[in-house]
Image (tube, coloured by chain):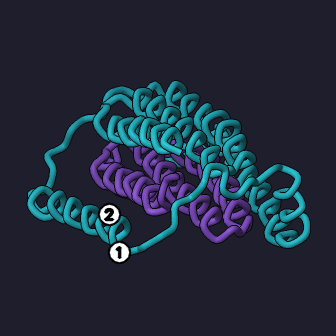
Amino acid sequence: MVPLSYYLVLGGILFACGVTGFLIKRNIITIFMSIELMLNGVNLSFVAFAAQWQALSGQVFVFFVMVVAAAEAAVGLAIIIAVYRTRETLNVDQVNLLKL
Amino acid sequence: MMLHLVIFSVFGIICVAAAVNLLVQRHPINSALSLVVVMGSLAVEFLLLGAEFVAAVQVIVYAGAVMVLFVFVIMLLNAGEEERTSASRVALLFGIPGMLVGSLLMAWVLLERSGTRAVAVGALPGPPKTIGWLLFHDYLLPFEITSVLILIAIMGAVVLASRQASARQTRREG
């Protein structure tokens, strides 16, 4: 038997790792991967709470989070490709204008 | 019962180690592969909780499709090692201790004060049949809205990444 709080702590650690990566990383693709890491931590909490409250809605929400993450990844990576094409760099320090 | 805790701990440690490896590695492809490990071990944690459908989707959609997209983009752009820039001193002085104190406090509150029950193995089975029934009855409207979202995302990705648009842009500027 694993207490629910262990799952929540694991999800929290993953979310904290994601936030840290988002803040310290300089490569725009790695920043995107940190966002995925945060979403995964949240998904774990969703499933753990679903098991705690015996409500399957939590697992359905995980499904929706995954769909949004996939859409976000597709659009985000397209933006990264567009940025790379005009600027020839992936370093976020050098991407400081929204203008193409 | 003991085995449950052992499996949880082993895959939890693998998960956290891969997440830290994602932060430490400097080449994006190494980070991407660590993220695949994180997602794979999370799928095992989902299975422990009984969410079999979510675990399968996690492996197929996340570790499969989304990460393949990431790896393709990394290879397409020929991304090299990231350059280290000097970190801000405020981040070092306050950020790291603050993060440590905050996460320890959160862990302490969750472990000592929340008083949650232990979750049994496969506590809430989520077979595809039940999930599908929920999706097409209780959550029909959100489900249909996601299909519109996906359509918009596909069109957005195609428009943003199309070579023609950016070529026209450079021609107009140059």
Tell me the shade of chain B.
Answer: cyan
- Name which quarter of the figure residue B138 lies in: bottom right
Chain of the residue under the numbered disc 2 shown in the image: B
**Residue B139 screen position, x and y as percent:** 82, 70
* Residue furthest out toward the front: B1
Residue type indicated by callout 1: Arg
Instruction: Write the residue at 9% across / 60% down.
Output: B93
Of callouts 2 and 1, the N-terminal one: 2
**Residue B164 screen position, x and y as percent:** 68, 40
Give the numbered dot on residue B113. 1
Tell me the shade of chain A.
Answer: purple
Q: Do the residues labelled 2 and 1 touch (CB within 8 Å)?
A: no
Give the numbered dot on residue A46. none
Instruction: Write the residue at 13% across / 64% down.
Output: B94
Residue type indicated by callout 2: Ala
User: Disc count in the image?
Assistant: 2
* Residue B142 or residue B28, whichever sits in front: B142
Instruction: Work out whether B124 lies above or below A74.
Output: below
Q: Do labels 2 and 1 share a chain?
A: yes
Horizontal side of B79 relative to B68 (left or right) equals left
Horizontal side of B121 relative to A93 (left or right) equals right
Q: At numbered mark 1, what does the secondary structure look like: helix, strand or loop?
A: helix
Mark 1 closeness class: few <14, some 14–19, many ≥20 residues within 10 Å: few
Q: At numbered mark 2, what does the secondary structure look like: helix, strand or loop?
A: helix
Give the numbered dot on residue B107. 2
